[in-house]
Image (cartoon, rainbow, N blue to C red):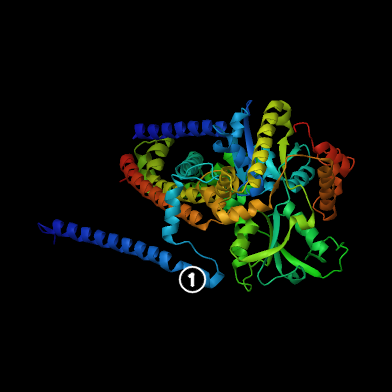
Amino acid sequence: MDKKIIAIVLVIVMIGGALTTGIVLMSSSTPSTPSNIRVGYITGDIHQLPFAIADNKTVGGTDSLYAKNGLNVTGKGYANGGVIMDTGFAQGEVDIAYVGSAPAISKHLNLGKLMLNTSIIAQVNEEGSLIVADNATHSASALVGKKVASPAKSSIQYLILLKWLENNGLNISGTLTPYNGTAPYLGSVNYTDAVAGTMKTLMTKPVTDGDHIAAFICWEPFGSDVIASEVGHLLASSHDVWPNHPCCVIVVSNVFAAEHPDVVKKFMAAHKAAINWTNAAKTAATSSDYNLLVTITKSFTSKNETVSKMALAEMKYSYEITAATKVMLEEFTQKMMDFNLIAASKLTYGGNTYASVQAFIASYVKTDYL
Amino acid sequence: MVQAGDNDILDRIKDSKLVGRLILGIAGAVAFILFWEYGMDPIAVSISGNHFPTFSESLNALMQSFTYREGWNPNYMGEHLGFSLVRVLMGFGLAAFVAIPLALLMGWMRNLESLLFPMNEIARPIPPLAWIPVAVILLSGEMKVVFICFLGAYFPILINTLQGVKSIDPLLFDAARTLGASRKDIFFKVVVPASSSHMMTGLKVGLGVAWMTIVAAEMIGATNGVGWYIYVSAVQLGNYAQALGGMILIGFVGYAIFMLMGMTEGRFLKWIGMR
């Protein structure tokens, strides 16, 4: 019996030792070595298609665009840009990511530079979000008292929704921000966050179902998916709200960029090549490149060919950051403050030392890598 | 009165009962599958207008996921399953490593039990998933997910093992002392073996809870694993057939874990001399 007890104790000690070793090894974040880079993106979001393009071996010819630029990429998918900032960057899981411009700005300011030391270094796309309504709703005014959804309050889609509602004399019920639009006030809508993949399901539910959403705004292809299946129809696009607005951007960890500037440059080279290839393929609808583009889109978004083509038609991919881009990012930041999504005091919070919104954008947006 | 040949008859009766139960079990499973295949979709459409993937669609999606992956999916299903199982084993192993000695000592030393039991009882009703903010603040990477799994397994192991110690017949202690056993002897030769049956029950339950918890934890804190796959498929992308396929896999693996623990329990108790 003694030997059995000793054996049990020894097994427990060995398991404990193995576990401790495993825990120590797993809990230490994998250091990024030159040419290794961890890339965050939003799963199934066609705005992030350049990631899938750059990662595709057929596009590159013999190897992916990332590999051709000497990169070893580990991709990490997330639910939305806010999560990429909160979890991906703040917890050291990613080095660079495709993120909506709104969470890229709001999370950095709200959490402070000490916790979220990042910069915007390129664009990914302009526009590309749709406001879709159910078949019983044919105008903005018909939404009074009904439920509308966006992927998250931190998303640029939410900001666009707030602006669109304001343009149409509406606001979100229960909001602390007084109505400030120029259109005559019509009333309020009820709001809910809804993960992108559930929006079609929620809109399909009967109007009498408490979960039914009468309208939503989402990144493509989720709007086109609803339209193609005739569950809903287009009410407005993000172009109608903010023409040529920057949408997704490339955000980088400043610590990573300082330690591996060459890796960031290589990433940017691959990003530019992916966008150039995508834009060229889009314009040649009968080419083999276009067919490949549709195939990659279908695989990345898990939508069928019809929806993928509809969504691609809504997309404008661009990596440039121009003076106009910066002005729009300033406008976004100010608008988020007007809507109480960012407090003005956050400009000087948690390591932030920005004298104004303009000073913030001038510092936060870097074009060195373009 | 037992007569020659009675054992054969009893064995045959026992076998026929087992066969009967097996047939009933299979019939139940077939009835469920048929209902899923033909009954769920009409019900779902009538309630919410949304289609409910059939059993065959879900199973097909599951089988495909082992050999084909979409652009958004970094791993094949076999790999996802591997990630989840590793996390379960890590969380469960850590829970066993902490809870078993702690419970044995708490049962053996009244003052230690008085010191630790109240806090354990306060923490016990808190669902493992409610600890996610704690995990997010204090831990990073894989450890967030393993911690949630650890919490799922820890309490069943602790409580059952402690109960095992407390339910030992006091006569055994008296007998051991009468035979001149020291405190150390009593602990290792009476307390540990006599509580092993309850301990194994705790381990069995703990492993099952760890499997349930790890899947939900992955939905929030991981970028691979079966739970992550289900969450992304269903919630982020709206691919319900894939999500249900993942659920089928979880069910079968959970059942396999339960069967394995049952076999291990029997062998262990026999080895330690308690059966």
Q: Is residue A243 left or right of residue A129?
A: right
Q: Nearer the viewer, residue A76 or B87?
A: A76
Where residue B127 appears, x then y in whole percent? 57, 53
Residue furthest left as drawn: B4
Residue depicted at 65% across the width and 70% down the height: A135
Reading the image, the residue beneath label 1 is B43
Counting the numbered discs, the total is: 1
Q: Nearer the viewer, residue B117 or B97?
A: B97
Residue A181 versus residue B167: which sits nearer the camera? A181
B93 relative to B164, above or below: above
Mark 1, Cα crowd under 10 Å, few <14 / some 14-19 / many 20+, is: some
Give the quarter of the figure containing the N terminus of chain B.
bottom left
Rendered view: A113 above or below B16: above
**Residue B233: x %, y % from top left:** 54, 52
Report in which chain the residue with disc 1 lies.
B
Residue A351: in sight, yes or no?
no
Q: Is residue A162 left or right of residue B86?
A: right
Left or right of residue A82, residue A307 in this image: left
Splitting the image into 4 quarters, where does residue A349 fall?
A: top right
The answer to whether residue A270 is seen in the rendering is yes
Task: Provide residue A325's location: percent of width, then percent of height.
Answer: 81, 44
The structure residue drawn at horizontal position 62% and vertical position 61%, both measured from the top left corner, is A226
Q: Quadrant of residue A213?
A: bottom right
**Does residue A189 appear to the left or right of A228 in the view shown?**
right
A149 vs B76: above or below: below
Residue A218 location, quadrant: bottom right
**Tag 1's secondary structure?**
helix
Closer-to-camera residue (A326/B230): A326
* Amino acid carrying mark 1 in the image: Ile
